[in-house]
C-alpha cells in the first residue's frame, strides 16, 4: 500500500520510471520521493537497523532519502525531479 495518496495534479503528464525493477508511473513535477511514496509504503530500509524509512527533512538537509540510479549514483529523492525512464533502486546492502 502506498504511503502517500495523490490528491491533486492527476491531469499532469505521466512519467514512466522503474523502482527496484518494477514499472511505475509518476507525474510531471514530482520529486523522486513523491513518485516512490505514491507507489510504496516506504522509501527504503535504514542502512543500519533495516527499519523502514520515508525521508526525514524533505528538503535535502539530512541523509535519509538516498536512492540509487541504474548507474550506481546516489541521489537525494526529496530534491531530485523525477525524469522519464529513471531506473531507481531503493534496496541496499546493510553497512558493516
Image (tube, grey):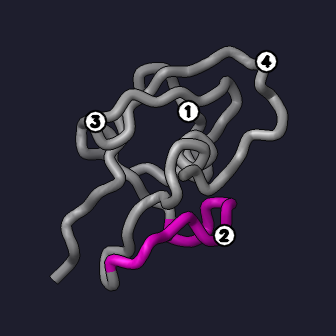
How crowded is the residue under tag 2: few (<14 C-alpha within 10 Å), some, or many (20+)? few
How crowded is the residue under tag 1: few (<14 C-alpha within 10 Å), some, or many (20+)? many
- For the residues labelled 4 and 1, the Cα–Cα distance comes to 16 Å
Is 21 drawn above or below residue 14 in the view shown? below
Closer to the chain start, of discs 2 and 3, is 3
Magenta segment: does it hold 85?
no
Q: Which contiguous range is marked in magenta? A: 50-64
Residue under label 3: 21
Residue under label 2: 57
Which of discs 4 and 1 lies nearer the camera? The answer is 4
Closer to the chain start, of discs 3 and 4, is 4
Viewed as shown, does residue 92 lie left or right of 17?
Answer: left
**Residue 12 place in picture, x, y as percent:** 75, 19
Residue under label 1: 82
The quadrant the C terminus occupies is bottom left
Q: SS at mark 1?
A: loop
The reply to whether discs 2 and 3 touch (Cβ–Cβ < 8 Å) is no
Closer to the chain start, of discs 1 and 3, is 3
- For the residues labelled 2 and 4, the Cα–Cα distance comes to 28 Å
Which of discs 1 and 3 lies nearer the camera? The answer is 3
Is 58 drawn above or below residue 68 in the view shown? below
Q: Tell me the residue at 35%/53% (across/down).
A: 90
Q: Tell me the residue at 65%/26% (across/down).
A: 27
> Given the current orientation, which residue lies at the most extreme front position?
1
Q: SS at mark 2?
A: loop
- For the residues labelled 2 and 3, the Cα–Cα distance comes to 27 Å
Residue under label 4: 11
**Residue 25 place in picture, x, y as percent:** 53, 27
Amino acid at each position: 500500500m502506498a504511503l502517500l495518496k495523490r490528491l491533486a495534479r492527476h491531469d499532469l503528464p505521466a512519467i514512466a520510471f522503474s523502482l527496484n525493477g518494477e514499472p511505475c508511473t509518476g507525474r510531471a513535477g514530482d520529486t523522486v520521493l513523491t513518485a516512490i511514496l505514491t507507489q510504496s509504503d516506504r522509501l527504503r530500509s535504514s542502512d543500519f537497523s533495516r527499519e523502514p524509512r520515508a525521508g526525514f527533512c524533505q528538503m535535502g538537509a539530512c541523509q535519509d532519502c538516498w536512492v540509487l540510479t541504474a548507474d550506481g549514483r546516489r541521489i537525494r529523492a526529496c530534491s531530485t525531479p523525477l525524469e522519464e525512464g529513471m531506473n531507481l533502486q531503493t534496496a541496499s546492502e546493510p553497512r558493516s
